Image (cartoon, helix red, strand yellow):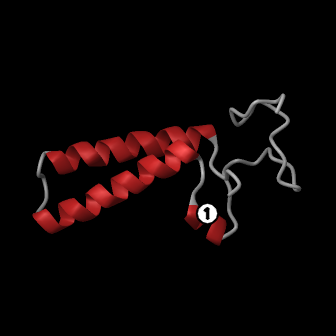
Amino acid sequence: MKRNVCVIDRSARILLGLAIGVITLLNAFGPYLSWVLCAIGLIMIVTGAIGVCPLYSFVKFATRRCADKRGENCRRDCCGADANK
C-alpha cells in the first residue's frame, strides 16, 4: 500500500496511541471499554509506525500531500521522505 500519512500525523498517532495505552493501564474505565480503548490505541500506534491508514485509503484522503500523482516517492523533504529514492 502507498503511504498516505505525513510525519506530523504519524507522530501524533503514535503519541495519542501511547497515551490511550497508559490510560487503559491505569484502569480508568471499565473492563470492556478498556479493551476497546486498548485496541484503538494499538491501531493508532501501528498506523503511525507504518505510515498507512486504511481508512484514509478507503475515503481517498491523504495527509501526505507532496507525493506526485503517479504514486512515486516524494521529491521534497516536506514529508520526511528521502528525496534520493
Which residue is at 13% across, 58% downward? 29
Residue 27 place in picture, x, y as percent: 11, 51
Total numbered circles: 1
Q: Pointer 1: residues within 10 angstroms few (<14), some, or many (20+)?
A: some
Which residue is at 65% across, 65% downward? 57
Residue 50 place in picture, x, y as percent: 56, 46
Position of 62 with respect to 51 (left or right) is: right
In which quarter of the view is residue 38 placed? bottom left
Which residue is at 68% across, 62% downward? 61
| Quadrant location of the C terminus in the rendered image | top right
User: Which residue ends up furthest to the bottom in the rendered image?
Assistant: 58
Residue 42 place in picture, x, y as percent: 36, 52
Position of 8 with respect to 80 (left or right) is: left
Which residue is at 44% across, 42% downward? 14
| Quadrant location of the N terminus in the rendered image | bottom right
Secondary structure under tag 1 reads helix
Between 3 and 63, the one lying in front of the other is 3
Vertical arrangement, residue 82 with respect to residue 40, above or below: above
Q: Which amino acid is tagged 1? A: Tyr
Residue 39 place in picture, x, y as percent: 32, 60
Residue pointed to by mark 1 = 56
Position of 7 with respect to 43 (left or right) is: right
